[in-house]
Image (cartoon, helix red, strand yellow):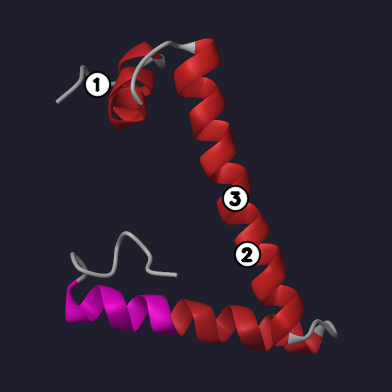
Amino acid sequence: MREPWDEAETPEEQAARRDAYRRLADAARRVGFSLESLSHMLRQVTHNEVETRRFLSEQVYGVPDAQLDSYLRARMPGGDAPK
């Protein structure tokens, strides 16, 4: 599965992401999770995020997903207007 950030990442961002994944994998091993279990949990988090965004955009706010972040920022106290 291709992640949406792959193409836009700078080499520094890629290195930071690899380092974060390494630390996460090391932590999972320390507490007894296999990398397969960790992978499954991360896929579930990704799925939950997609479904949450879909629900918020379609059922709660009635805005297209592409506009959801800007819409929420504008509605939050101290939030910026959409850019």
Name the residue rendered at 60%, 78% in the picture.
Answer: 24
Name the residue rendered at 63%, 45% in the picture.
Answer: 48
In the foreground, 17 or 40: 40
Helix, strand, or loop for circle 3? helix
- Disc nearer the start of the sequence (1/3): 3
Disc on res. 80? 1
Distance between the Cα atoms at labels 1 and 2? 30 Å
Closer to the eye: label 1 or 3? 3
Distance between the Cα atoms at labels 2 and 3? 9 Å
Distance between the Cα atoms at labels 1 and 3? 28 Å
Left/right placement of residue 28 relative to residue 82 reads right
Question: Is residue 55 positioned above or below 7 on the image?
Answer: above
Residue 61's quadrant in the figure?
top left
Disc on res. 47? 3
User: Which residue carries the number 2 mark?
Assistant: 42
Helix, strand, or loop for circle 1? loop
Contact between marks 2 and 3 (CB within 8 A): the answer is no
**What number of labels is visible?**
3
- Disc nearer the start of the sequence (2/3): 2
Q: Residue furthest right?
A: 32
Crowd around label 2: few <14 · some 14–19 · many ≥20 (10 Å): few
**Kind of residue at badge 1:** Asp
* Magenta span of residues: 10-18
Closer to the eye: label 2 or 3? 3
Magenta segment, principal secondary structure?
helix
Helix, strand, or loop for circle 2? helix
Left/right placement of residue 53 relative to residue 4 reads right
Disc on res. 69? none
Closer to the eye: label 1 or 2? 2
Q: Residue furthest front?
A: 1
Left/right placement of residue 16 relative to residue 13 reads right
Residue 74's quadrant in the figure?
top left
